[in-house]
Image: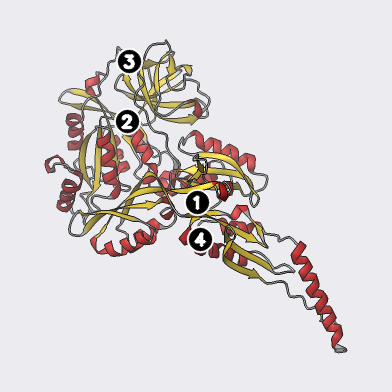
């Protein structure tokens, strides 16, 4: 296929605006899959994607189309819509020259619509704006066109009207893709340059590398070199996605496909690396990707004491197909041996845990999610701390810094007051307000990441009656009044329950934890003191009463001094036991205190 007849493009949109449905119509119309094999969400290969109705991994498919007597190849990459998987979107756009930007005809421009538009423009892509779901009874096409013109800066005449469900307008969209998206630039006879934009692990073929060829060609038996890692391999198979993997003789400049080369471990392949030929030449590496930065952390521990090795194998398997997932071993005095895991967001964390339980059949205990913090020490060095138990001594700390994100919020205009109050409660810094229409507003805040990872989105949906949307992006760390909150049980610190909190929230958080422990720790023969402290200052305290054994029950009348003697002996015994006795904290008490906040 001539390079001028190739079109590489992505479908980008806010979550649930119809990306996967539109991809289904493309596949159905262009006959890439026999009718008996066709199913809804054709490009969503994981069961969890189908059940949740979301795309988690970007998927590619090669389509063939004829226009005005000329055959064209359309390489489509379907992308996720949720903010946690923006990294997948950015990787996909690097392999494209154009993007189809979908907007729901009923919901209009949403927070991630704006974010994805900026991503496309940053990559210098030709954007085709499309209004989807025009078949809905509550579609408000005229208003949405005005929003797209005002907010996204597109021209009204460029906007196409489509229904991915019924197929209305899809043929016109095909024409626009062929005519408006430029052909890729490259030379099939030049030295090989291919960009790695994804990779997955297969039990039989090893690592399958997804590539976009910029120059040269790639075929079986060819000896290649990864410029970034310096590793050498011999290609065993090349192919394209139809959407199933289909082996071909050769991939040429401008095409999107895959290759295998008996690569045993996913860590040997770097996303964003450049593939070239084995012979040493001064080949310029292609612009790659920034590594994904985990923003949310939690501990994962085996539910059974003997399940550590099974969990480790399951995490390694998960990491093979999810390069943005990170983990390292850790030990907790409360929960035993486990792993500290890093995720891009809460949905990413929930999906990872569900995949562990389904694909590897392991039961895990998950601790409350938290963010990572930067700590500036007295010697001016900076360390990143993801677990309060690993915090340097207070005397060595000069400054705490917390991660801050820029949050874009699109809400009904009548909810602005309630939203601003919520953002103020979460230590948000107001930036701007723009009105999309008389009924919808676009607000921007800078907020600490720790304030939005628990229930901020749920609160947003509640105060906007389900019509609010949000998108956020990490902008850096800023100094903050953070403290380490210690939990003491019977006067002894319990490191597993320590956490880093804002000073203004320390008393509330500490009281919540010790109230939970008060309910879960069984009574002992002596009074147990529960304390939440910042350094030597106690900010919350509760007691667990001692077991009240009736030592005078055997006395039937008689001299009162006998009863007093027994009571005094009991009092002395409890005093001595409080000094030397140890509090037994059951695991369910740790789980209740470490579990995710409601």
Q: Which circle marks residue 298 in the picture? A: none
Which residue was labeled with disc 2? 94
Which residue was labeled with disc 4? 506
Badge 2 or badge 1: first in the primary sequence: 2
Between label 1 and label 3, give the one nearer the viewer. 1
In depth, the one of 337 and 284 nearer the eye is 284
Crowdedness near tag 2: few (<14), some (14–19) or many (≥20) residues, C-alpha within 10 Å: many
Please tell me whether residue 335 is drawn above or below residue 259 in the rendered image: below
Which residue was labeled with disc 1? 369
Badge 3 or badge 2: first in the primary sequence: 2
- The CA span between labels 1 and 4 is 17 Å
The answer to whether the residue labelled 2 contacts the one labelled 1, judged by CB atoms less than 8 Å apart, is no
What residue do we see at 41% from left, 44% from top? 49
Which residue was labeled with disc 3? 216
Crowdedness near tag 1: few (<14), some (14–19) or many (≥20) residues, C-alpha within 10 Å: many
Between label 3 and label 2, give the one nearer the viewer. 2
Q: Residue furthest front?
A: 379
Badge 1 or badge 3: first in the primary sequence: 3
């Amino acid at each position: 296929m001539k390079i001028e007849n190739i079109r590489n493009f992505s479908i980008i949109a806010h979550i649930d605006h119809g990306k996967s449905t539109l991809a289904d119509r493309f596949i159905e119309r262009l006959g890439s899959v026999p009718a008996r094999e066709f199913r809804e969400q054709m490009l969503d290969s994981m069961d969890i994607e189908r059940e949740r109705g979301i795309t988690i991994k970007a998927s590619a498919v090669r389509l063939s189309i004829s226009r005005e007597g000329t055959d064209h190849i359309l390489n489509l990459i379907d992308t996720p819509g949720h903010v946690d998987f923006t990294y997948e979107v950015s990787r996909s756009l690097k392999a494209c020259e154009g993007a189809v930007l979908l907007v729901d005809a009923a919901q209009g421009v949403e927070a991630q619509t704006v974010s994805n538009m900026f991503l496309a423009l940053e990559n210098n892509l030709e954007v085709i704006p499309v209004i989807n779901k025009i078949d809905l009874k509550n579609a408000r096409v005229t208003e949405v066109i005005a929003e797209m013109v005002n907010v996204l800066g597109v021209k009204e005449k460029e906007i196409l009207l489509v229904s991915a469900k019924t197929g209305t307008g899809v043929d016109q969209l095909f024409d626009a893709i062929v005519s408006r998206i430029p052909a890729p630039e490259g030379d099939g006879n030049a030295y090989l340059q291919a960009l790695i934009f994804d990779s997955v692990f297969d039990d039989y073929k090893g690592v399958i590398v997804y590539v976009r060829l910029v120059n040269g060609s790639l075929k079986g038996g060819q000896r290649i070199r990864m410029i970034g890692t310096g590793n050498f391999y011999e290609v065993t198979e090349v192919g394209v996605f139809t959407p199933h993997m289909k082996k071909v003789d050769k991939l040429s400049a401008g095409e999107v496909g895959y290759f295998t080369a008996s690569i045993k471990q996913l860590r040997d392949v770097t996303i964003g690396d450049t593939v070239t030929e084995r012979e040493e030449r001064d080949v310029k590496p292609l612009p790659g990707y920034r590594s994904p930065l985990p923003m949310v952390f939690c501990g994962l521990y085996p539910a059974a004491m003997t399940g550590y090795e099974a969990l480790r194998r399951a995490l390694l398997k998960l990491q093979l197909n999810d390069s943005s997932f990170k983990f390292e071993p850790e030990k907790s005095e409360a929960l035993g041996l486990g792993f500290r895991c890093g995720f891009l967001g809460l949905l990413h964390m929930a999906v990872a845990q569900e995949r562990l339980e389904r694909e590897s059949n392991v039961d895990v205990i998950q601790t409350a999610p938290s963010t990572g913090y930067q700590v500036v020490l007295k010697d001016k060095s900076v360390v990143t701390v993801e677990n309060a138990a690993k915090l340097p001594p207070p005397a060595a700390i000069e400054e705490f810094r917390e991660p801050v994100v820029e949050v874009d919020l699109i809400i009904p205009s009548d909810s602005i007051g309630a939203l601003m109050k919520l953002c103020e409660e979460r230590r948000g810094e107001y930036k701007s307000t723009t009105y999309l229409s008389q009924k919808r507003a676009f607000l921007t805040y800078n907020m600490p990441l720790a304030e939005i990872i628990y229930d901020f989105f749920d609160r947003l949906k509640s105060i906007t009656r389900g019509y609010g949307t949000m998108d956020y992006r990490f902008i850096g760390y800023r100094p903050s009044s953070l403290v380490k909150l210690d939990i003491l049980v019977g006067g002894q610190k319990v490191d597993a329950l320590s956490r880093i909190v804002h000073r203004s929230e320390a008393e509330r958080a500490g009281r919540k934890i010790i109230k939970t422990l008060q309910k879960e720790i069984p009574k002992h023969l002596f009074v147990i003191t529960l304390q939440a402290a910042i350094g030597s200052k106690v900010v919350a305290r509760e007691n667990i009463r001692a077991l009240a054994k009736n030592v005078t029950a055997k006395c039937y009348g008689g001299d009162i001094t006998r009863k007093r003697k027994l009571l005094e002996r009991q009092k002395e015994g409890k005093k001595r036991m409080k000094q030397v006795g140890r509090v037994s904290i059951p695991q369910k008490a740790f789980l209740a205190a470490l579990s995710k906040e409601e």
